[in-house]
Image (tube, grey):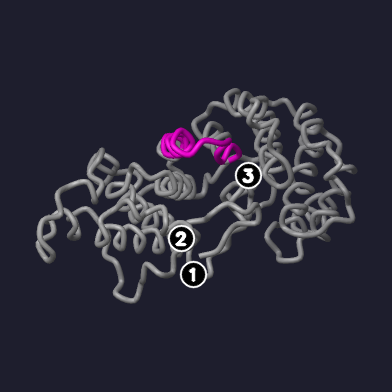
C-alpha cells in the first residue's frame, strides 16, 4: 500500500496502481481518469456496466447491511469474542496468504477503533479489494462491501467502498459511499469520481454543477484536471461539443508534457475537437496524446489511424 500522487492515503494494496486516485480508470473513452480510450469524453466505465451479472446486480441479497461494525460490542474475556467477528455468510473468502500488513499503515491506523480481530479482517478485505479492483471489480466490490459492513463508521472504508463500486459500474452505490466518506472526513472528496458517477446515472447536469462548486475551485493539479475532463464529458453527453472544448482549454494543454495525466487530457481534448467538427485540430492532439502516452494507456494511435484512414 502506498500513498497516491496527491499525498492522500489509498486503500489499494500490493502492486496495484494508485494512478486512479483522482478518478478511477474507465473502460472506454471516458471516466475520471480514463485508462482505456483516454479522456473523459465518452462516459464512465460502461464496460463494467455492460457486464453486470455479478455481485452488483444482486444488491438485494449481496449488499452491505446497515451498521454491523465490529468493535462496539462488549468484548468479554480474552478468547471469548462475539461471534460477529467471525466470517459472515455473505462475505467472500479471504486467501490465507493475504495479510493486514499489506495495507497502508496510515489506513490501518484509522482502523484502531475497531476490535483487533475485526480490524485485521477489515484490513485484509481492503487489501483484496485493492488487488482485484482492476481485473475483477465485481469480486473486489464484494470485499469492499464486507469491509464496509464491518466498519461503516470509518471514512477510509467508505471511500474504498465507493471507489470499488465505481470501478464495478455501480454508480449510485459509489456516489452514496463517497458522499458518506466526505461527510465523515471533510474536504472535497473525490469530486471527479463523484461527477462521473452522476454521468453514469444519466445526470450530466449534476456533474457540471459539481464542476462549478466551491470545492472544485479549490482543487489544483491532477485533481482539477480530472474534474475538468469529466465536466467536458458531461458537456458532450448533452451535445455541447464547443463548450466541452472550452472546458479543457487550460495551460495544462502543453504538448511538451508527457505521462498518464497529460495523455488523458490531450486525448479528451482531441475527442472534444473531433466531436465539434474540428478534425484537423483533433488529429493534432491525438498525435500529442500518443507522444505523451509513454505507457500505452490510451488508444490514441488507433484514433489517429481512424482519422487518417490508415486503419483500412
Marks 2 and 1, the one that precedes in the sequence: 1
Q: Are marks 2 and 1 in contact (CB under 8 Å)?
A: yes
The mark found on residue 130 in the picture is 2
Q: Is residue 213 left or right of residue 97?
A: right
Residue at label 3? Answer: 30
Percent coordinates x, y for residue 140 in the rendering: 39, 57
- Residue at 19% from the left image edge and 60% from the top image edge: 87
Q: Nearer the viewer, residue 240 or 65?
A: 65
Secondary structure under the numbered disc 2 in the rendered image? helix
Q: Which residues are magenta?
A: 175-192
Secondary structure under the numbered disc 1 in the rendered image? loop
Residue 174 visible from this viewpoint: yes
Magenta stretch: includes residue 180: yes
Q: Is residue 260 left or right of residue 66?
A: right
Percent coordinates x, y for residue 218 in the rendering: 69, 33
Marks 2 and 3, the one that precedes in the sequence: 3
Q: Quadrant of the C terminus?
A: bottom right
Residue at label 1? Answer: 14
**Vertical placement of 304 versus 208: above or below?**
below
- Residue at 58% from the left image edge and 34% from the top image edge: 195
Amino acid at each position: 500500500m502506498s500513498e497516491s500522487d496527491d499525498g492522500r492515503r489509498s486503500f489499494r494494496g500490493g502492486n496495484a496502481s494508485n494512478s486512479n486516485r483522482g478518478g478511477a480508470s474507465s473502460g472506454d473513452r471516458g471516466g475520471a481518469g480514463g485508462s482505456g480510450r483516454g479522456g473523459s469524453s465518452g462516459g464512465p466505465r460502461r464496460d463494467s456496466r455492460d457486464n453486470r451479472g455479478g455481485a452488483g446486480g444482486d444488491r438485494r441479497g449481496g449488499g452491505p447491511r446497515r451498521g454491523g461494525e465490529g468493535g462496539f460490542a462488549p468484548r468479554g474475556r480474552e478468547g471469548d469474542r462475539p461471534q460477529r467477528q467471525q466470517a459472515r455468510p455473505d462475505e467472500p473468502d479471504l486467501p490465507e496468504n493475504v495479510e493486514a500488513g499489506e495495507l497502508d499503515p496510515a489506513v490501518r491506523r484509522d482502523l484502531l477503533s475497531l476490535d483487533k480481530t475485526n480490524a485485521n479482517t477489515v484490513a485484509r478485505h481492503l487489501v483484496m479489494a485493492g488487488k482485484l479492483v482492476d481485473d475483477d471489480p465485481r469480486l473486489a466490490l464484494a470485499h469492499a462491501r464486507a469491509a464496509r459492513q464491518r466498519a461503516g463508521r470509518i471514512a477510509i472504508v467508505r471511500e474504498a467502498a465507493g471507489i470499488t463500486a465505481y470501478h464495478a459500474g455501480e454508480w449510485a452505490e459509489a456516489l452514496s459511499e463517497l458522499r458518506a466518506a466526505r461527510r465523515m472526513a471533510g474536504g472535497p472528496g473525490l469530486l471527479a469520481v463523484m461527477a462521473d458517477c452522476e454521468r453514469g446515472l444519466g445526470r450530466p447536469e449534476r456533474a457540471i454543477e459539481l464542476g462549478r462548486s466551491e470545492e472544485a475551485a479549490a482543487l489544483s493539479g491532477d485533481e482539477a484536471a480530472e474534474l475538468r475532463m469529466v465536466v467536458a464529458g458531461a458537456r458532450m453527453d448533452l451535445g455541447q461539443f464547443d463548450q466541452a472544448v472550452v472546458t479543457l482549454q487550460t495551460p495544462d494543454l502543453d504538448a511538451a508534457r508527457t505521462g498518464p495525466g497529460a495523455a488523458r487530457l490531450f486525448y479528451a481534448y482531441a475527442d472534444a475537437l473531433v466531436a465539434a467538427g474540428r478534425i484537423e485540430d483533433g488529429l493534432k492532439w491525438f498525435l500529442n496524446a500518443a507522444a505523451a502516452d509513454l505507457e500505452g494507456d490510451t488508444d490514441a494511435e488507433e484514433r489517429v489511424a481512424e482519422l487518417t484512414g490508415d486503419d483500412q
